[in-house]
Image: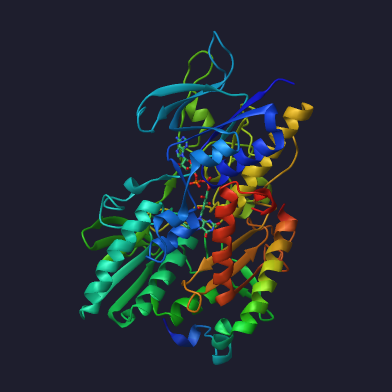
């Protein structure tokens, strides 16, 4: 694959993917998003 | 009110859910019987972790007999083989015939009468569609816990050779042009990548992802337009990025034609033929349904009427052949009821979908290379619950409930693991709503962008792990199991 055409994570994104406080926050956010989606589908 | 007999075929995600809810809703008003060939329930999504040696088969299997005993559900270990939806001349009560797979009664046949039947027999793993595919051929699979255990063993052998300095090629993906479950193949390839890195041999491996998707991120749902970082981003872009980042080489639009020892021969959407030499291959099989030989009162064979050519059971979908441009969410079933017998239902992978969700594509030789529509765990379980609820309503009031569980309305959450471990683990968390795009309601993207998003991170791994424990708790029928949503 030619990297010119590929979106690549920058350092900040790579860091945040594993940064504990941010990931705890995302854990909560994603769970809320899933529950919202379920509420709509159920 | 007399006690009704509800028979559920298949103790997988959809059937087990249907049986447990039917008992919960109806209590003593219903005898619930489950017929299923394996003595244990398999939480299939976690097979991925078994397949890389990060979990054992025992972690994803639950003995069914104690669960059913505790919940007053009758369990017969066997395989349904025949269906008599009009009963016999001397007894018009419908029944199924099953063949025992339990030790002590192996091969014995028995008739079980029903008032309501829920067919939740899931997929038949059709390895035979590609010569040389599967555990009896030259590749491994992660579709069952035992397949996944063997995959982990084979992977470990290859890793040991890499540790001795040898370079190896590993191929992961779909073993036929019409496979489904691309999400599972996607998860497995990234988990293999993580395992190779964990064991310090990633530089010795060429990792190839062979998929029937025309582009990465299709997932059998025609791709997803995700709301991320202030942009509506096609899932292709996110998937391309991940494959690039992890140095996994994709082979797109591929239809493996046959496998030989350490070699897969394929053709692709352009008609090009290719072959890949491999040291390890995990290629998923295409799915068929479980066709039950069916007979009417006159003992005439009505199997072809009840089941589609791919052996899935026809339900309340619109099966009229249509062009891609004319596909609509309304084509998809809402109640999962047989159009021929109102007391027969098919849920999960057992129901016949009206068509694919991804755009159908053929190569110049006319070979269909298109993902079949996925029916993942969450919608399968919702179908099981909704059908149980509607039947319960009929038993209590005389009128079938009107709850629906259409893939044209409901959403799905897909947490695709891209590695395990508390610190190294991560997942792509995706939600989409609806599963089948609705371009009338959402002209730009086909889906509600407020409910359709995706991101990569460690939190996704925690969610996946949490769901593993929650769903195993739920499947065990442990206290307040019904509080856990599907
Ligand atoms: C490797 C892999 C990973 C996956 N990962 C995910 C994931 O992360 N998230 C997700 O949502 N989905 C995932 N899925 C999909 C998910 O497993 C399926 O959607 C789900 O299992 C479908 O439920 P089902 O009840 O239709 O079929 P199954 O769960 O397969 O159950 C079918 C049951 O019927 C039984 N049966 C078969 N024949 C007969 C017969 N003749 N008579 C009686 N019983 C019979 C089978 O033994 C089985 O117990 C994955 C699938 C695979 C293969």
| Residue B444 visible in the picture | no
Q: Residue at x 45, y 57 (%)?
A: B59
The residue nearer to you, when weighing B269 against B318, is B318
The residue nearer to you, when weighing B391 against B153, is B153
Examine the image and state in which quarter residue B201 appears: bottom left
The residue nearer to you, when weighing B151 against B405, is B151
Examine the image and state in which quarter residue B383 appears: top right
| Residue B353 visible in the picture | yes
Residue B221 in percent (x, y) is at 56, 59
| B209 displayed left or right of B45 | left
Outermost residue toward the bottom in this view: A11
Outermost residue toward the top in this view: B90
Residue B337 in percent (x, y) is at 64, 35
- The color scheme shown is rainbow
Tell me if residue B109 comes above or below residue B14 in the rendering: above
Tell me if residue B100 comes above or below residue B223 in the rendering: above
Residue B40 in percent (x, y) is at 45, 44
Residue B434 in percent (x, y) is at 67, 58
The residue nearer to you, when weighing B8 against B190, is B8
Q: Residue at x 35, y 53 (%)?
A: B147
Tell me if residue A38 comes above or below residue B193 in the rendering: above
Q: Residue at x 59, y 58 (%)?
A: B470
Quadrant where the N terminus of chain B lies?
top right
Q: How many marks?
A: 0
| B280 displayed left or right of B316 | left
| B409 displayed left or right of B152 | right
Examine the image and state in which quarter residue B107 appears: top left
């Amino acid at each position: 694959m030619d990297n010119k055409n590929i979106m690549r994570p920058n350092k900040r994104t790579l860091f945040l993917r594993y940064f504990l406080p941010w990931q705890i926050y995302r854990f909560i956010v994603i769970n809320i998003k899933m529950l919202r989606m379920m509420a709509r589908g159920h | 009110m007399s006690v009704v007999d509800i028979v559920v075929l298949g103790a997988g995600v959809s059937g087990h859910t249907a049986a447990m809810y039917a008992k919960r809703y109806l209590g003593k008003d219903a005898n619930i019987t489950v017929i299923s060939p394996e003595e244990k329930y398999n939480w299939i999504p976690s097979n991925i972790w078994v397949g890389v040696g990060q979990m054992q088969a025992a972690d994803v299997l639950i003995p069914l007999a104690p669960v059913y005993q505790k919940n007053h559900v009758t369990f017969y270990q066997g395989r349904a083989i025949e269906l008599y939806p009009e009963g016999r001349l001397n007894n018009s009560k419908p029944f199924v015939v099953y063949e025992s797979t339990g030790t002590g009664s192996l091969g014995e046949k028995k008739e079980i009468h029903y008032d309501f039947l829920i067919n939740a027999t899931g997929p038949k793993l059709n390895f035979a569609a590609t010569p040389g595919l599967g555990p009896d051929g030259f590749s491994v699979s992660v579709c069952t816990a035992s397949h996944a255990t063997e995959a982990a063993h084979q992977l470990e052998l290859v890793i040991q050779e890499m540790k001795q300095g040898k370079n190896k090629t590993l191929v992961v993906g779909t073993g036929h042009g019409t496979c489904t479950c691309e999400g599972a193949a996607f998860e497995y390839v990234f988990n293999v990548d993580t395992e190779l890195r964990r064991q310090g041999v990633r530089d010795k491996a060429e990792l190839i992802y062979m998929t029937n998707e025309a582009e990465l991120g299709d997932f059998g749902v025609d791709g997803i337009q995700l709301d991320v970082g202030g942009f509506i981003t096609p899932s292709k872009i996110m998937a391309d990025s991940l494959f690039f980042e992890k140095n996994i080489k994709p082979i797109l639009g591929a239809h493996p034609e046959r496998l030989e020892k350490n070699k897969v021969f394929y053709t692709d959407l352009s008609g090009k033929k290719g072959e890949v030499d491999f040291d390890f291959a995990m290629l998923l099989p295409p799915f068929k349904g479980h066709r039950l030989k069916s007979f009417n009162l006159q003992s005439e064979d009505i199997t072809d009427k009840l089941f589609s050519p791919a052996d899935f059971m026809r339900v309340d979908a619109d099966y009229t052949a249509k062009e891609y441009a004319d596909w609509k969410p309304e084509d998809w079933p809402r109640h999962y009821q047989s159009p021929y017998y109102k007391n027969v239902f098919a849920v999960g992978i057992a129901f016949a979908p009206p068509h694919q969700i991804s755009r159908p594509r053929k190569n110049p030789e006319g070979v269909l290379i298109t993902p079949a529509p996925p029916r993942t765990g969450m919608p399968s379980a919702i179908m099981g619950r909704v059908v149980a609820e509607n039947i319960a309503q009929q038993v209590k009031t005389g009128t079938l409930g009107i709850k629906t569980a259409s893939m044209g309305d409901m959403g799905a959450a897909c947490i695709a693991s891209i590695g395990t471990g508390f610190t190294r683990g991560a997942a792509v968390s995706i939600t989409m709503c609806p599963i089948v795009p609705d371009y009338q309601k959402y002209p730009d993207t086909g889906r509600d962008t407020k409910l359709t998003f995706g991101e990569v991170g460690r939190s996704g791994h925690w969610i996946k792990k949490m769901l593993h424990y929650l769903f195993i708790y739920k499947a065990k029928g442990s206290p307040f199991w019904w509080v856990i949503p599907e």
